[in-house]
Image: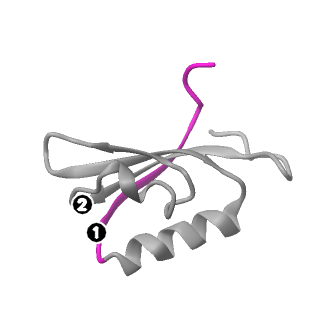
Amino acid sequence: MTKPARRNEETFYEIRVGGLLDESWSGWLEGLAITPTDDGNTVLTGPIRDQCALHGLLVKIRDLGLPLLSVEQKEPTGG
């Protein structure tokens, strides 16, 4: 089970959407890293400050008309 984030602590997410986005969308999508996949989908990764910001980001994805494939809380990689 994933430990809940403490207040004011960003949580790292991986969000998969159907369709391709290029890196130019990163600023509009709260600075998340954008990685196109070989199967024609896109993976968005990075820290999101809280649940309110996550829901706002999901609304932006909906407004783009992209199918939401998955949302996963992850441990950050690298350092």
Determine the residue positioned at 13% across, 45% down: 39
Looking at the figure, which quarter contains the N terminus?
A: top right
Earlier-in-chain disc, 1 versus 2: 2
Q: Residue 47 or 3: which is nearer the viewer?
A: 47
Give the residue at the far bottom of this rendering. Answer: 63
In the rendered structure, find residue 18 and report the number of the disc placed on it.
2
Q: Quadrant of residue 71?
A: bottom left
**What segment carries the magenta color?**
65-79
Residue 10 image point, x, y percent: 72, 46
In the rendered structure, the answer to whether residue 28 lies left or right of residue 63 reads right
Tell me the kind of residue under disc 1. Answer: Pro
Q: Residue at x 69, y 69 (%)?
A: 52
**Disc 1 crowd, CA 10 A, few/some/many (<14, 14-19, 20+):** few
Label 2 near label 1: C-beta < 8 Å?
yes
Secondary structure at badge 1 equals loop
Residue where numbered disc 1 is placed: 67
Residue 13 - label: none
